Image (cartoon, grey):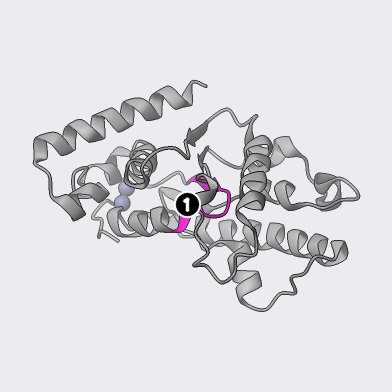
Amino acid sequence: MVPCGCTGQHDPRRIVLTGGPGAGKTAVLELIRHGFCEHVVVLPESAGMLFGGGFPRNSHDVVRRAGQRAIYHVQRELEESAIAREPAIVLCDRGTIDGVAYWPGPGDFWEELGTTLDRELARYHAVIHLRTPPDSDYNHANPLRLETAREARVIDERIARAWQTHPRRFEIGAEEDFLDKAARALALIRVELPDCCRAHVDQASMMPRTNIAAPSTASTTATTRRNERSGMRTSRR
Ligand SMILES: [Zn+2]
Ligand SMILES: [Zn+2]
């Protein structure tokens, strides 16, 4: 978290980072926590909070529905709490839309929650989807993760469908190198910052490759430009 001297009034933008299990979301969020100024508030994942805190989790549809309703409400309240701090960006580790991908039915997810897909899509300024990598790369390190590699891919596809009508949806492909994926996600978030906060986020220092291989400034800048260009390309899909 970089200290920030800006005294400007921020108009908070909610941005979602989503993706199926094993996409590298947690690692990207960690880079963002360290690379951006204090006006980028990174929320915890509501599903992780609930299940990590002991909320029941099993294959019964009644329990699964209860879990998704709880996640929805916790997510909304996490966002409200963050907005109160007047940040420039509230970065959500998944949003209220993701629950559709896990909803077992019967009954419509949105009706059950007294809302609509359009109303929920309108909550978010942009959504960045990190796609789940091929089966062989699937990471079982997270003890809260129950899915097999195949299930992870299915969930990732369902998440993509759930968000597909968002007008500012950016997709970062599973086939890319993780560091490239991370750099693209960071570049996408950086352009959403207001000038007052963006000015002192050093573009070079937030690139993950810089921390590992320390390339020359010129090549880092070129990589950043390439990633920003590819980010813009994605936005027009
Ligand atoms: Zn600012
Ligand atoms: Zn700031």
The three-letter code of the residue at mark 1 reads Asp
Is the CB atom of the residue marked by disc 1 within 8 angstroms of ligand 2's nearest atom?
A: no
Q: Residues within 10 Å of mark 1 (few under 14, many from 20)?
A: few
Residue 197 among magenta residues:
no
Above or below residue 134? Residue 84 is below
Q: Position of residue 175 (x, y in %)?
A: 44, 37
Image: magenta residue range: 13-26
Q: Position of residue 226 (x, y in %)?
A: 27, 28
Q: Is residue 201 visible?
A: no
Q: Is residue 162 visible?
A: yes
Residue under the point 17% across and 35% down: 221
Question: Where the N terminus falls, by quadrant?
Answer: bottom left
Q: Quadrant of the rendered structure where residue 116 is?
A: top right
Outermost residue, bottom side: 54
Residue under the point 29% across and 46% down: 197
Residue assigned mark 1: 137
Answer left or right for 95 relative to 173. Answer: right
Above or below residue 189? Residue 25 is below
